[in-house]
Amino acid sequence: MLEYMNKTAQSVWDNCLLFIKDNIQEQAYKTWFEPIKAVELSDNALYIQVPSKFFYEWLEEHYVKLLKVALTKELGQGAKLLYKIKMENKLGNKLPFTEQLPSNNHAAVKPQEVDAPIQNKNPELKNPFVIPGIRNVKIESQLNSNYNFDNFLEGESNRLARSAGMAVANKPGGTSFNPLLFFGGVGLGKTHLAHAIGVEIKEKHPEKTVLYISAEVFTQQYTDSVKKNTRNDFIHFYQLIDVLIIDDVQFLSGKAGTQDVFFHIFNYLHQNGKQVILTSDKAPVDMQDIEQRLLSRFKWGLSAEIQQPDYETRVAILKNILFRDGVEMPEEIVEYVAKNIKTNIRELEGAIISLIAQSSFNRREVTLELAKQVVEKFVKNVKREVSIDYIQKVVSDYFQLDMETLQSKTRKRDVVQARQLAMFFAKKFTKSSLATIGSQIGDRDHATVLHACKTVDNLVATDKQFKKYVEDIHKKLSL
């Protein structure tokens, strides 16, 4: 205990810590060395107290060389390091656990077998908040086997993403695609592809620990760990993962504590050759309220955009669904649905399934007329995505400008404001990246678009006339 701590032991340990701190990352130092207490110095042997058996095992596996160098500098070649583990048993006693640090003059002593408290010898961690035990932990991957590469159809819109996913599945952590981030609009297959990589890795590398989790659940787990004072257990759990898949990472926006803990987990996994896979509805450059140090790491590997599927891919998707369900349908009907449902794959699947259901329930033959009825009703319930060109046309007409003037380099106030409004509504009504919006509206960069959006927000709050412009144009685009 602290009140009986030998000051010499403390001074030796303090000097060791100074050396250790200069040689490892700050977070690793805080996590693994700040909780240690120096207990006793006897016969050139330093006794330190660590919180758990897992803590001891981690130090011995990852920092034994560093510890040896630090202690040898203080006590010479005959230095020994021995551990005392603070065991939380029913009697409240501290059970000693000793291990001699290997050195040039001393052989390692086999440690006494003392088990840390384990709730369950072979736990299934379906909701990974804490680690019930250290050995033989089996982690449920939470993958959906129905989302695999076999039923993820390749097209121009997703070829890069799918190819990168296959490369990672074949060699997780061993490619330059780490992290691998998929971004794009809703219903384009980001989650499907992320699951497919995990499923493939489990098949080809069964020894790998894979975990799929949404950023929302990850955040909730972290919040719970803070409330229960088990933050270290939370971190330790995620450091056990070989392939971590986090869906909808943009959900971390504005959550400073979760971003901080994810930053350190990410660093550990990346430095140890583990694979990280992320999905987002935005490109890293367009994410707001995410720390720059985290965004910079998102850019280390590959960011692959998944775009809206082209006509040929939409036809292939529909035919694949029909084949899967054992349904035959005339070619003209498949083509009609593919031409009229363009927004995303999820809506495309919904339309064809609705058509099949209408036919089955009403015992009607699937005709082009029926297809038109179903698609028309379906599309009316779907919020159509407005194109950037259409937005520019609406804004130009509203201010009685031509498109060429809107996109020009002129700095006239009325044209600048019209251009900024076009950028603002393009960001609001489309899934396009800031870079894409800028390139289509006068060949500007993403920073110009971001500035335009902030300017519009400020003017809406301070200028009544400008606020009316925004309301009028919004109504026109919402029709």
Image (cartoon, rainbow, N blue to C red):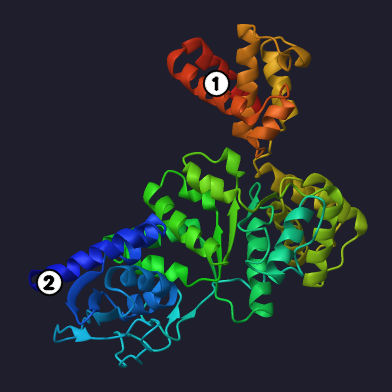
Q: Residue at x 81, y 52 (%)?
A: 371
Q: Residue at x 26, y 66 (%)?
A: 35
Quarter of the picture holding the C terminus: top right
Q: Residues within 10 Å of mark 2 (few under 14, many from 20)?
A: some
Residue type at numbered disc 2: Met
Residue type at numbered disc 1: Glu
Query: Could you give the CA–CA distance between mark 2 and mark 1, rounded to whole angstroms?
Result: 71 Å
Q: Residue at x 81, y 73 (%)?
A: 326
Q: Which dot marks residue 389? A: none
Left or right: where 188 falls relative to 23: right
Identify the element where label 2 is drawn.
loop
On the image, which quarter does residue 55 sit in? bottom left
On the image, which quarter does residue 413 sit in? top right
What residue occupies the far top of the structure in this picture?
Answer: 412
Q: Nearer the viewer, residue 357 or 297?
A: 297
The residue carrying mark 1 is 471
Identify the element where label 1 is drawn.
helix
Vertically, is 269 above or below 50?
Answer: above
Q: Residues within 10 Å of mark 1 (few under 14, many from 20)?
A: few
Quarter of the picture holding the N terminus: bottom left
Q: Which dot marks residue 5? A: 2
Q: Residue 105: x, y in percent?
A: 37, 85
Q: Residue 10: x, y in percent?
A: 18, 67
Q: Nearer the viewer, residue 114 or 308?
A: 114
Left or right: where 383 falls relative to 78: right
What residue occupies the far left of the structure in this picture?
Answer: 3
Q: Residue 418: x, y in percent?
A: 64, 15
Check if mark 2's residue and mark 1's residue have beta carbons within 8 Å: no
